[in-house]
Every structure is written in C-alpha cells, then in structure tokens.
Image (spheres, rainbow, N blue to C red):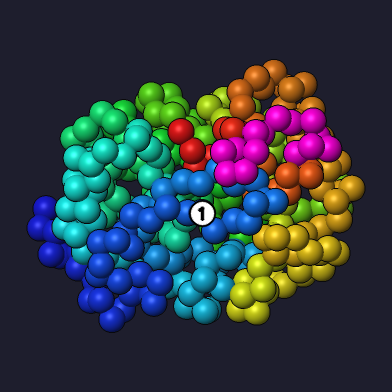
Amino acid sequence: MTDNWTDYFVPANELCRVGSKEKANIIRKFDKTPSDIVCPHFYELNWGYGCPFECAYCYLQGTFHGNKAPRHHPVSQTVATLREYFHSNLEPTVFNSGELADSLSFPHVMEKIADTFEEQNKHKLLLLTKSCDIDFLLKKLRKNTIISFSLNAQIAAERWESKAPPPKARILAGKKLKEMGYEVRVRIDPIFPIHEWKIEYANLIRLLLSNFVPSRVTLGTPRGLQKTILYGKGDRSWINFFSEDSGWGKKIATPLRKSIYEFFCQEFKDNGYLEPIAICKETAEMYKDLKINIGSYPNWTCQCNCTW
C-alpha cells in the first residue's frame, strides 16, 4: 500500500452532486430534522459517498438519485479540512463518517483519516458500518476512533441487506475490536415487524451480548423517505409495513412501534444490559409515551449513536 494520497484521488466530476471539492461540504452539521423528530444535531464527516452493499431500504438510494456507487474526496483534502477544524474553537465533537457512506467503503482511505484523529485529543471519529473489513483497525488501537456496527435479525438481513456480511460476522468483528480496546456501539435499525419478530430479534440480542457489550445501543424502525421509496431497488416489500406519516418520512403504526421499543428495552434489560439505549429519528410524542426524558428541541439529551 502506498502512502501517496494522490493515489486515492477521485475526480470531482465523479462525486455526487451533494458533495464537491469545497471544504465546507466535507464537514457539515446535520440539523435537518424538524422540531417534532428527536435527533440531537451532530457533525457529518463527508469524506466519501455511497456504499458497496445493496440494502433495499437504504436512504442513500434516494440521496444519490439511485447512484450510490462508492466514491471519495482526495484524502489530502479531507485531512487538511480536519486539521483546520482541530485548531478551531469547536467544542469536543464526534464526527460521523457514516452518514453519506459506509465508513469502511475504502479502508485504506479511512486508515489515513483515523490516523489524523490521533494527532489531537479533543474530537472523536465515528465509523458506522456493516463491513467486517477491519484489518487496519486491528493493526493498532486508535483511542479517538469509535466503531458502530449496524445490525439486524438474520432473516431480515437475508431479505433486505443484499451483499452485506451476515449479522453474526459483524458481531464477531465488533467483539475483536472491543477486546482490543475500542469503544464499540451498535445500531439495530431498521427493526422490521416480520413474522415472529420477537423471537428473531431476541436471538439477535442474545447473540450480541454473548459476544460483547456495546457502549450504547440505538434502535430504529423503518423510515420511508419519499426519495428512498422512489429510487429503492431490490425487495421492496419493506414498504408494505408503513401506515402513517411523520415529519421524517412514513412510519409503521404508532402502537406497533411502541411495542417494538418496549420489547427491545425489556429484552436488553433482562439480558443484563445497563448501558444507554436511544431511538433514531423518532417522534417526541413516542419518547413521551415511552416515558423517556429527552429534553426539548433543539437541545435533545438522549445518548444517540452519532453524539458524544
């Protein structure tokens, strides 16, 4: 592997329209959610775009108008932008590198980025991924890197997460990183109310906790943004679960969503899990129904995946 950053250059005209060679787009605050949707605002590190996996429900299909082939900015540009922010007055921040890309789409690129975070002790890099390509992370511990694995029940993964490693493989990758000393988080999202969903997801929870205890868990149910539904490919049966609208796309029925979250929280508790659990882009009313205190807009206080 070469250390020459120019070897990783991707011409600007090959990047998606939402990205550009402007540094302002490489780091951007995510604050798009309306006031009735709970989502603590966070910083995106848009080093690249797209994903090699073909999950039928993936919102990147809509974001990129059907073209989510992985591509990235020149690493030198991303590194230079980070160093500028490291010397700014920005409060300690988690930079989410998995909002517009699978964070491990290009491991050799992310290795350079993760090493850059080791030049300082104020900010953290968040890797969000379904990938098990973790070799560079196992070479040495990077104390300013957090890894978050996206998981699902095996039957749901087989149906809607084409080309992604099996959930068990992701869990075992997380176990290796946890044992090495990394902070490892987990997203179980989107949770589908499939046949015998309680059994399927209880099996996932037990498999997870029998291998490692994540530092936090974020839950989510399907969110049907208009462009995702329009450009979505593969098995589109996941759309059939929707029955109501919200400020962040279509959702499955409120009573069912509530029962899903209650089940997961109880199941984690029954298996001895005591770390934070949050819910992704859910309504404030749902949090109220669940009796979870999350503050108020825009200062939500829940400990979500993308926050410190």
- Relative side of 170 to 251, left or right: left
- Relative side of 73 to 69, left or right: left
Q: Pick whichever, 250 or 141, lies toward us.
A: 250
Residue drawn at (75%, 64%) of the image: 250
Is 295 situated above or below 194?
above
Is 114 situated above or below 32?
above
The residue sitting at the right extreme is 255
Looking at the rendered structure, the kind of residue marked 1 is Asp
Magenta residues, start to end = 287-300
Instruction: Kindly identify which residue carries mark 1.
Output: 31
Residue drawn at (38%, 24%) of the image: 181
Q: Position of residue 226 (x, y in %)?
A: 67, 73
Which secondary structure, mark 1? loop
Is 87 situated above or below 20?
above
Instruction: State which quadrant residue 88 falls in.
Output: top left
Q: Pick whichever, 94 or 3, lies toward us.
A: 94
- Relative side of 211 to 266, left or right: left
Q: Position of residue 153 (x, y in %)?
A: 70, 47
- Label 1 crowding class (10 Å Cα cut-off): few <14, some 14-19, many 20+? few
Residue drawn at (73%, 44%) of the image: 284
Is 33 situated above or below 121?
below
Instruction: State which quadrant residue 114 falls in.
Output: top left
Residue 188 visible from this viewpoint: no
Q: Position of residue 218 (x, y in %)?
A: 62, 39
Quarter holding the N terminus is: bottom left
Q: Position of residue 266 (x, y in %)?
A: 79, 27
